[in-house]
Amino acid sequence: MNTRRDVTALENALPFNKSSARERLSKDIIKAVKNAQTLIDENEPTTAIFSKLCKKVGVYYAFNQRNKEIALRYLEKFKALVVEQNLQEEIADAYNLIGFASALDTQYNKVQPFEQALQIYAAFNQKNPAEFRLEEGFALRHIALMLYRQEKLEEAIEKVKEAIETQKQHTKTPSLKLIEIAESLHVFGNILAKQEKYTEAEKKYMQAKALWEEYKNTGLSAHPAKFSMLQSLSNTQMQLNKNNQAFFTLEQTYAEQLAYFADIEDHPDITRTLNLIEIAKTKIGLEKNKKMDTAGSHSISFFSKSDTPKTAVSAASSATPGVRF
């Protein structure tokens, strides 16, 4: 067996990169991931040739499968290998990715991995400003997310504004700029929703949606981060009693998810969308009953903030490529 050749072949078969568009998950790609896992696990990698493969497998499970445990297993191996080689840029990326994967757990709220990444990027951005300022934007957005989870909402807003400004100025690839700014607008919208500024939050989500439509019009494949943004949009629309609009948003989300996750059974993102659809249907039904009820003068009470089903909050709280709020 030629390990180096096999590793290189699998690296080339996997398109995954944190900052680039993910391809639709075909059966061939999923098979390649499984083969890569087997190769890594059987060889217990200690050499540099495995570092990129560990990274790509970790990115797949973090961004596409939303599986924190498996993602971290391979991302920690990636980090260990690049630390051994003292590859500072890759170490920074490892911090970013490990923070991202950890944040798939909605209770996770630590800023440290992203701050560690920022410190390294700051030292290297003179060498390649475009590349490292892009990574800084990613880290800043996730610091905003962690501050949001700590309920430090004003600080979170300042960080997400900084992320958006960095992405506008320093992301040179048009498709990447659309992705990065759309994901940051999603974070911004969720912070505003947490402050119960639902109209303002809806505007941020709609701005993100427009960027995702522009991204789609470039001819690129669907992107999973769009789905979680649409879930958040629908939840905010329901808070504003725009229940028919929310239902339409969710129908669109579900159709696109079925196409994107065609070869993955029971994906958690689809389950969240279906939960939200049921809630939207219930609220639409309540509205219809209210209009038909001419006997009483009391209005029907929709879900209050304390009553809102947990499935709705959980389903609509995903953001950035798959991180949940």
Image (tube, helix red, strand yellow):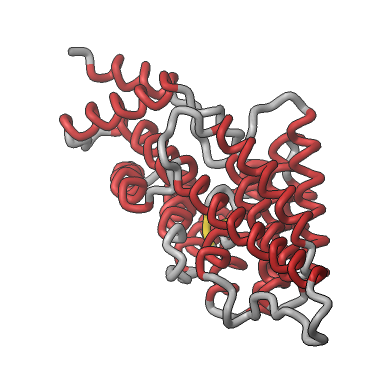
- Asked if residue 97 is positioned above or below residue 286 in the image, the reply reads above
Q: Position of residue 234 (x, y in %)?
A: 70, 57
Which one is nearer the viewer's eye here, 53 or 220?
Answer: 220
Which quadrant of the figure has residue 292?
bottom right
Q: Residue sitting at 77 percent across and 82 percent down?
A: 299
Q: Residue sitting at 55 percent across and 50 percent down?
A: 274
Q: Residue sitting at 79 percent across and 60 percent down?
A: 204
The C terminus is located in which quarter? bottom right
Q: Position of residue 3 (x, y in %)?
A: 23, 19
Q: Residue sitting at 58 percent across and 82 percent down?
A: 306
Q: Is residue 189 visible?
A: no
Which one is nearer the viewer's eye here, 234 or 57?
Answer: 234
Which one is nearer the viewer's eye here, 125 or 151?
Answer: 151
Q: Is residue 167 left or right of residue 26?
A: right
Q: Position of residue 71 (x, y in %)?
A: 36, 46
**How many dots with numbers?**
0
Q: Position of residue 76 (x, y in %)?
A: 31, 49
The N terminus is located in which quarter? top left
Q: Is residue 168 left or right of residue 153?
A: right
Q: Is residue 185 visible?
A: yes
